[in-house]
Image (tube, grey):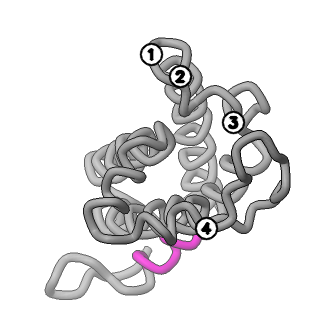
């Protein structure tokens, strides 16, 4: 087990937890998420809410598995309350981002509407079937920022 520093968060613990959450994020968002969840999580109403909640559930379970493997492999010990708070921060922030409209509104409010729209296919065309969109970049950076916060809570 790592010794805690005076601030209560040891840098090595934080780094290990962040790495585990980052890997879990990549796996959950790109491998575990179903095509149905990806296609429907941003839809208005209950169909979108349900698809997004299902994705966030499997996303959070993937993070929990990654943290469990980290603990078993390293002997690291984390406070269950901190892990619970951290995973809740991660889940709630992930749901907000993946409903899509909230991030678009934030981008619009911050003057980043053009960046958010970057790479979006034109109406009636499928002329940019790629991950290289402004919306995707903003979505991922949002997730990474909240993974940082979640890792801080987990490492308390």
Circle nearer the N terminus (1, 4): 1
Marks 1 and 2: CB-CB under 8 Å? yes
Q: Is residue 20 visible?
A: no
Q: Nearer the viewer, mark 2 or mark 4?
A: 4
Q: Which is more toward the observer, 77 or 44?
A: 44
* Disc 3 target residue: 38
Circle nearer the N terminus (3, 4): 3
Mark pair 3, 4: CA separation: 20 Å
Residue furthest left in the image? 6
Mark 3 residue element = helix
- Left or right relative to 15: residue 137: right
Q: Measured along the vertical axis of the image, is residue 77 above or below residue 29?
A: below
- Left or right relative to 80: residue 133: right
| Residue 106 placement (x, y as % from top left) | 31, 57
Marks 2 and 3: CB-CB under 8 Å? no
* Disc 1 target residue: 45
* Disc 2 target residue: 48
* Disc 4 target residue: 118
Q: Measured along the vertical axis of the image, is residue 57 above or below residue 23?
A: above
Q: Which is more toward the observer, 63 or 76?
A: 63
Q: Nearer the viewer, mark 1 or mark 3?
A: 1
For disc 3, the neighbor class at 10 Å (few under 14, some 14 to 19, many from 20) is: some
Q: Which is more toward the observer, 40 or 10?
A: 40
Q: Who's the residue at 47% across and 60% down the image?
A: 143
Mark 1 residue element = helix
Mark pair 1, 3: CA separation: 15 Å
Q: Measured along the vertical axis of the image, is residue 33 above or below residue 142?
A: above
Does the segment drawn in magenta span residue 26?
A: no
Magenta stretch in the rendered image: 13-19
| Residue 127 placement (x, y as % from top left) | 84, 56
| Residue 31 placement (x, y as % from top left) | 79, 46
């Amino acid at each position: 087990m790592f010794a805690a520093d005076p601030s209560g968060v040891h840098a090595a613990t934080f780094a290990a937890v962040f790495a585990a959450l980052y890997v879990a994020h990549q796996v959950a968002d790109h491998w575990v998420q179903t095509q149905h969840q990806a296609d429907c999580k941003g839809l208005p109403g209950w169909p979108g809410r349900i698809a997004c909640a299902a994705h966030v559930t499997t996303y959070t379970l993937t993070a929990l598995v990654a943290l469990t493997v980290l603990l078993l492999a390293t002997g690291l010990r984390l406070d269950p309350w901190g892990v619970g708070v951290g995973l809740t921060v991660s889940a709630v922030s992930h749901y907000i981002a993946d409903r899509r409209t909230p991030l678009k509104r934030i981008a619009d409010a911050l003057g980043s509407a053009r960046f958010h729209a970057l790479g979006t296919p034109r109406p009636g065309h499928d002329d940019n079937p790629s991950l290289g969109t402004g919306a995707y970049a903003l979505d991922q950076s949002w997730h990474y920022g909240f993974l940082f916060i979640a890792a801080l809570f987990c490492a308390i």
